Image (tube, rainbow, N blue to C red):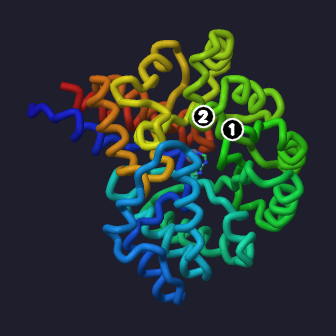
Amino acid sequence: MNQISINEFIEGIPKAELHLHIEGTFEPELMFEIAHRNNISINYSSVDDLKKAYNFNNLQEFLDIYYAGASVLITEQDFYDLTWAYLTKVHEQNIVHTEIFFDPQTHTDRGVSFETVIHGIHNALEVGKEKLGISSHLIMCFLRHLDEESAFETLNQALPYKKWITAVGLDSSELGNPPSKFERVFSKAIDEGFITVAHAGEEGPADYIWEAINLLKVSRIDHGNRSLDDDQLIKFLSDKQIPLTICPLSNLELKVVDDLINHPLLKLMDAGLMVTINSDDPAYFGGYMNENYCRIASALNLSKEQIKELAKNSFQSSFLSDDDKEIMIRKIEQYYQKNNN
Ligand code: ADE
Ligand code: ZN
């Protein structure tokens, strides 16, 4: 039997994506196209000129550009086109399930209605399911640099759309905006039946991860790199198998790590944590899921068996039903048996 390379193995294995901001999939070409049709001028003369600005020293420098990019999204069609472009990419990369963040406040604060945003995204996801066979869940994020009142307002806007939104999350500028700031909003979200997740320990300390667990009752930690600073936390995350959604290329581009060879992924796996690979904001960080898998596999010399574990973890950590998880995990085992030579 012909041996396939690790990259081919990665490309072919079925995967789930659990940490993906739909606004972070906004490719410059589509951004220019949508800006043009909405008669909005972009501060950059060309796609290449814009791409040159994608050079970040930290999370905030990225967020400033990311929010500026998202500001050309106005109509339901814009949100549909953005989501559809992502789904076609997902389809090429053997991602069969995706759990997508969206940031309503980025849009409602500019006068775009919540309805416009959710209808555009949801309709594309429905077509993605029907035409591409991609299942999905939506996770509504609160922007943590904004206040509690704005988060409550956003939660209230989401209530009529409960059947389309599985979970709530927390993103944006982490330092100085601890999870505790949103304890009451998350408590109401839980009462309303939402699952909870939160970005924690990307730039912020391990204490923020404890807060996300203890105060926001999260089912997953988004990023969580800094958990390695706290032995007790590592033991807790391992004992409880609370998943971490790790984003290697994001960590590299936002200088959370200086080099992928120093990325903590293997340390976290070796400590027995439930870790997954994700793309975060692929249009800004130089790669979608397969690029994230391939680059980290090369930097850390991961084996096919380790890739198989990561792909299995992606389904195990998802919000799919136990039956659906089981089906996918079995498929991955079969794929491994066929291709691990
Ligand atoms: N919003 C989009 N990407 C993010 C990230 N990596 N961290 C926090 N907020 C974000
Ligand atoms: Zn993120």
Assign a secondary structure to mark 1: loop
User: Would you call the spot at circle 2 few (<14 residues within 10 Å), some (14-19), or many (20 or more)?
Assistant: many
Give the crowd class for mark 1: few <14, some 14-19, many >=20 residues within 10 Å. Answer: some
Q: Which amino acid type is shown beneath numbered disc 2?
A: Glu
Whether the residues at callouts 1 and 2 have beta carbons within 8 Å, the answer is yes
Against 35, residue 255 (above or below) is: above
3 in relation to 269, above or below: below
Q: Amino acid at mark 1?
A: Leu
Vertical side of 124 occupied by 171: above or below: above
Q: Quadrant of the N terminus?
A: top left
| Viewport quadrant of the C terminus | top left
- Secondary structure of the residue carrying tag 2 is loop
Task: Tell me if residue 204 comes above or below residue 303 in the rendering.
Answer: below
Q: Is mark 1 within 8 Å of ligand 1?
A: no
- Image-based side of 35 in relation to 199, left or right: left
Q: Is residue 288 left or right of residue 78?
A: left
For marks 1 and 2, the one nearer the N-term is 1
* Ligand 1 within 8 Å, label 2 CB: no
Question: How far from the left and from the top, in percent, is residue 23?
Answer: 55, 62
Pinpoint residue 69: horizontal percent, then vertical percent.
52, 68
Viewer-side residue, 144 vs 157: 144
Q: Which residue is mark 2?
A: 203
